[in-house]
Image: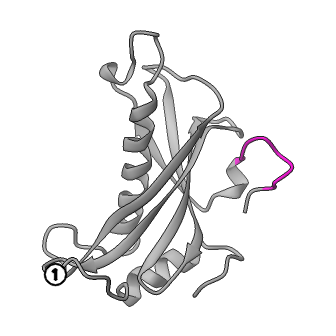
Amino acid sequence: MSNPDRSRGVRGDYGYFTPITTRWHDNDLYGHVNNVTYYGYFDSVANHFLIHEGGLDIHHGAVIGLVVSSGCRYHAAVAYPEKLEGALRVNRLGNSSVEYGVAVFREGEDDAVAEGYFTHVFVDRGTRRPVGMPEGLRKALARIAGGVEQV
C-alpha cells in the first residue's frame, strides 16, 4: 500500500502492470494528455487484469462489473507519444465489490504521474443485482491485494 507520507505513489505500491499506448488524440489543446483520458487508462488496466488474470468473460459471462465510484490525482503532465504503463492494486476486497488503486507511470520511471481509485460492484448480467464475484476472479484479485482487509 502507499505510504501516506509520500505525495505520490511508486511502482512498489502496485502489483500488476501493463503497457499503455498513448494516441495522438489523447492530447488536448494544452499539449498534454487530457484529464478524462486517464479514466480510460484506469479502466483499461483493470479490465486487462480481470480478463487475462481473473478469467472474466466480458462478452458472455453471467457476472459483470459496474463502476460505482472513482477519483484521480494528477502529479505530472504527459503527452503523446510518451510510453506509459498502467498499474493496479486492490485497496479493498469485498464479497461483491472491489476498490482498485490505479496509477500511470512513464515507462522506466518510479514515480506515478497520476493515481486514482475506482470501485467495481459485480452484478448479475441480466438483473443487475449484486452477486458474489466468481472464485477465480476473487483469487486473482487477492494476489494483488497485499495486506488489505478482505471482507
Report which residue position mark 1 lands on.
127
- Residue 110, percent from left and from top: 71, 40
* Left or right, 90 with reference to 137: right
Examine the structure image and report whether residue 124 is included in the region drawn in magenta.
Answer: no
Q: Is residue 123 above or below residue 45?
A: below
Q: Nearer the viewer, residue 7 or 80?
A: 7
Name the residue type under label 1: Thr
- Residue 112, percent from left and from top: 65, 39
- Residue 88, percent from left and from top: 54, 57
The image quarter containing residue 109 is top right
Examine the structure image and report whether residue 8 is included in the region drawn in magenta.
Answer: yes
Q: Nearer the viewer, residue 86 or 32?
A: 32
- Residue 16, percent from left and from top: 54, 59
The image quarter containing residue 146 is bottom right
* Left or right, 73 with reference to 125: right
Q: Helix, strand or loop at disc 1?
A: loop
> Would residue 144 be seen by someone viewing this image from the given angle?
no
Q: Is residue 134 above or below residue 58?
A: below
- Write the residue at 32% across / 87% down: 131
Quarter placement of the N terminus: bottom right
- Colour mode? one colour
Q: Which residues are magenta?
A: 3-10
* Left or right, 63 with reference to 106: left
